[in-house]
Image (cartoon, rainbow, N blue to C red):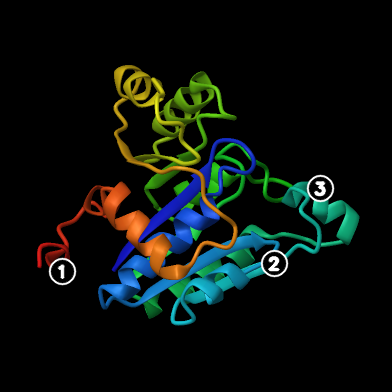
Amino acid sequence: MRRLFITGIEKNPHKTFITAGLAATLQSLGYTTCVYKPAANDMDIFRRIDPRIKAFASYIIKTKKDPIVAQIEEGIAIKFSQISGDYRDIYKECEFTFVEGTNGLMTPLGQDFFEDDLAKSLNLPVLFVAAPAQTPVDNVIININHAVVSGIPVRGVILNDCPEKTGMPRLIEEHTDAKVLGMLGKMRPNIKPDELISTILTSVDIEGVLDMKIAKLEL
């Protein structure tokens, strides 16, 4: 069983499309896939892209506010024990499990824990998703180095909503040990499942993301 924590650097890098695309691509290759979100606004995208994806969330937030804010406004008590317990029940069901975070490893999820605490406790490597048009490269470098210092393995970075020309990949690889494993253009909200899978297959180093050889990709 392979497991991966996917998180952003700032808000709205469309990381959910990346998560859904990776999950749907693996499903198309014949693997069973789970997506788990500790706190989510909506899980419908996974069902729309591929209803075979097993999608779970411990907490559903009615607004698009950050979890720490939603706890106050909606009266939700987000607990570390609930999240870790749910995760350990879920990941055993599938060959691949993607845990999707929020706005970055330094985002508070509960009263006394952050996203990096969760990734470290669950012993998950991290894949960052960043959008060059809205995220300064120094923020990406800071987040990668924060993970390394915290003892969290960094699998790499996927750049989304990426302009044709950007120096971000070179700068990331010059100033960190992380690899840029994919560069995707702007995602349409109504992208069709087959188009999303095709984009992932052609624009992302899936074997690098998963840190393994996938025989079915060689066929």
Whether pointer 2 and pointer 1 mark residues with C-beta atoms closer than 8 Å, the reply is: no
Quadrant of residue 126 in the image?
top left
Q: Position of residue 162 (x, y in %)?
A: 46, 35
For marks 1 and 3, the one nearer the N-term is: 3
Determine which residue is flagged by label 2. Answer: 59
Disc assigned to residue 69: 3
Question: Which secondary structure lies at badge 3?
Answer: helix
Q: Is residue 208 visible?
A: yes
Quadrant of residue 198 in the image?
bottom left
- Quadrant of the drawing holding the N terminus: bottom left
Q: 188 above or below 112?
A: below
Disc assigned to residue 216: 1
Kindly report which numbered mark, 1 or 3, lies closer to the viewer in this rendering.
1
Indicate the amino acid at tag 2: Tyr
| Cα gap from disc 2 to disc 3, whole angstroms | 13 Å
- Residue at position x 39%, y 20% in the image: 167
- Mark 3: give few (<14), some (14-19) or many (20+) Cα within 10 Å: some
- Quadrant of the drawing holding the C terminus: bottom left
Indicate the amino acid at tag 1: Lys
- Residue at position x 56%, y 52% in the image: 101
Whether pointer 1 and pointer 3 mark residues with C-beta atoms closer than 8 Å, the reply is: no
- Residue at position x 71%, y 51% in the image: 110
Q: 164 above or below 118?
A: above
- Residue at position x 36%, y 18% in the image: 171
